[in-house]
Image (cartoon, rainbow, N blue to C red):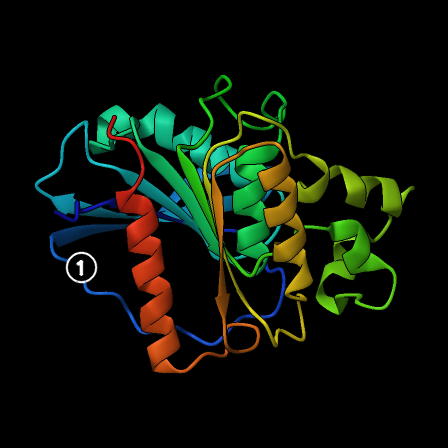
Amino acid sequence: MRTAHSVVLAALAAGCASAKSSPTPTLAARYTVVPNLVYLRVGDWEGRLDLYLPEPRGPATPTLVWIHGGGWTRSCAVAWVHREAPQHGLGTATVVVSGISAGGHLALETAFVDAELPATCPGSRTPPPTAVVSWFGPTDVEAAIAGPHTIDQVLPWFDGVVDPAATARAVSPIHQVRPGLPPVLLLHGTRDDLVPYAHSVALHDALDRVDVPNRLVTLDGGHGDFDDATWVRAWDEVWQFLDSLPAR
């Protein structure tokens, strides 16, 4: 049976261009929405998220963190989930991180970065996500800022950075692959003219080489520009992936 998820929508700074909206998947449970919760403050900036809480829910209810933007505050949002779980009744045994475009990149980084939380992020280091679902997210940021497939929307991320190439490499999932990472699902259109399909192919091959469970779902379309049948197939693949995760 398909389990209802608590959904945390982390609204981060703008990143890659927005993709075409997908058909909304059917949710089997009634949800209580708690909007605009602050998960991080840095100076005058506030990071906010929305909670979609299924009724009923309990400690075993899986939690999905959906990142629909860009920036580098993704780990703080996941840390907030663990820190505030008792107050909101969030399950933390299974935490899946997902995102679209730049959010897909951040979802991967949340699982792949092996480091302590930033000093601006309250709390201690949290367990890695249970799994990652990346919808056509960049995996090689170094290639995205130089070369034949530069992504214009990524370039402002590096304004004022002393060594952009080194920094871009440091935040590229393709360069952080190692054994022991959580399972990864990659979904990407073969005709993506913003984030080339090759990004997901390269990450899929790299994960295979170190025996990290992963799957690449090849979609017919561009950067989220899919017909309804393709969206339905894509969501079916996501549900199958989530249903295949070991019970916790």
Nearest to the observer: residue 38 or residue 97: 97
Tell me where residue 147 appears, x and y as whole percent. 88, 63
User: Eyeballing the image, is 21 above or below 185?
Assistant: below
Picture residue at 53% right of the left edge, 30% below the top = 181
Quadrant in the picture for residue 129: top left
In terms of secondary structure, where does tag 1 sit? loop
Picture residue at 31% right of the left edge, 74% below the top = 23
Tell me where residue 184 appears, x and y as whole percent. 48, 43
Picture residue at 29% right of the left edge, 52% below the top = 240
Tell me where residue 40 appears, x and y as whole percent. 50, 36
Is 43 left or right of 219, judged from the image as shown? right
Q: Is residue 201 visible?
A: yes
Nearest to the observer: residue 8 or residue 36: 8
Nearest to the observer: residue 73 or residue 234: 234
User: Eyeballing the image, is 22 above or below 139?
Assistant: below
Q: Residue furthest left?
A: 56
User: Eyeballing the image, is 154 above or below 87?
Assistant: below
Q: Is residue 7 visible?
A: no
Tell me where residue 68 appears, x and y as whole percent. 48, 57
Is 212 left or right of 229, judged from the image as shown? right
Amino acid at pointer 1: Leu
Q: Which residue is mark 1?
A: 27
Picture residue at 49% right of the left edge, 17% below the top = 124
**Position of the C terminus by quadrant:** top left
